[in-house]
Amino acid sequence: MSVKSLSIRIGEEMLAKLHYIADYEERSANGQVIILIRKCIDEFEKEHGEITYGNVQQKQLADDLHNS
């Protein structure tokens, strides 16, 4: 599995709070963001079912066709 990079825009106060929580949990800010993303995915999948790589590819193809 390759690792990808994601750039986000975040307000100064929210970033400071993220760092505060990450420090408290003895993680990097990046590690904390990964934890939060995993939690979001887990909650989504509990409600809607597992997201498979095939589902992701199909949605991307459909989005690409729609945006063409």
Image (cartoon, rainbow, N blue to C red):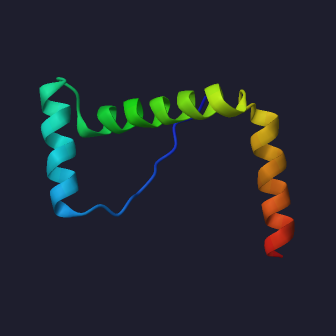
Relative placement, left or right, of 33 versus 51 is left
Q: Position of residue 26 (x, y in %)?
A: 17, 23
Relative placement, left or right, of 24 versus 56 is left
Identify the residue at horizontal 80%, vertical 65% (top origin). Answer: 64
Number of numbered discs: 0
Camera-nearest residue between 3 and 27: 27
Residue placed furthest toward the bottom: 68
**Where is the C terminus found, in terms of image quarters?**
bottom right
**Where is the N terminus found, in terms of image quarters?**
top right
Picture quarter containing residue 54?
top right
Q: Position of residue 11 (x, y in %)?
A: 24, 63
Q: Position of residue 42 (x, y in %)?
A: 55, 27
Relative placement, left or right, of 55 versus 34 is right
Identify the residue at horizontal 75%, vertical 34% (top origin). Answer: 53
Q: Position of residue 47 (x, y in %)?
A: 65, 31
Using the image, determine if residue 28 lies above or below residue 19.
Answer: above
Relative placement, left or right, of 41 versus 54 is left
